[in-house]
Image (spheres, helix red, strand yellow):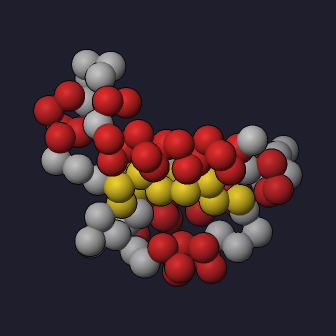
Amino acid sequence: MSECNLLGIKKLNNLINKNTKEIKKEKINIIFNKYNLNSIDYELLNKAFKNIRILGKINYTNKIEKIINTGKIIKINSIKKDLLKIIKKIN
């Protein structure tokens, strides 16, 4: 999982490049977290990681900050919809 900002993308890219000797790129799946208006365009993310399977993105909502550590995060409808889309891609 990675955030959709330049620092998050750089860290993810470094991590992938370091570990692709041990892990084949086609076995890597990415989920972009906290996607919002300031995030890198989703189409650009797809192009940047074209050889890696992108399962989807989880859109940011300010409700996350209030309940991030409570275990109730799945109850936020917008996140639930994003996670259901991702689960469909896994199956």
51 w.r.t. 60: above or below: below
The mark tally for this picture is 0
Residue 79: image x %, image y %? 37, 44
Query: Could you tell whether 67 is left or right of 12 in the image?
Result: left
Name above or below for residue 66 compared with residue 32.
above
| Front position in the image: 51 or 90 | 90
Task: Identify which residue, 24 or 80, lies in the foreground.
Answer: 80
Q: Position of residue 1 (x, y in %)?
A: 51, 46
Q: Residue furthest top?
A: 70
Quarter-of-image position of residue 4 = bottom left
Left or right: 29, with 7 as reference point: right
Residue 12 visible from this viewpoint: no
- Residue 67 coordinates in the image, percent (x, y): 20, 28
* Residue nearer the viewer, 78 or 29: 78
Q: Residue at x 48, y 73 (%)?
A: 42
Residue under the point 29% across and 64% down: 36
* Residue 82 horizontal side relative to residue 64, left or right: right
Image quadrant containing the C terminus: top right
Spot occupied by residue 82 in the image (x, y as percentages of width and height): 45, 49
Residue at the spot x=65%, y=70% of the render?
49
In percent of the image, x 55 and y 56: which residue is there?
56
Asked whether residue 85 is in view, the answer is yes
Please give left or right for residue 19 compared with residue 35 in the image: right
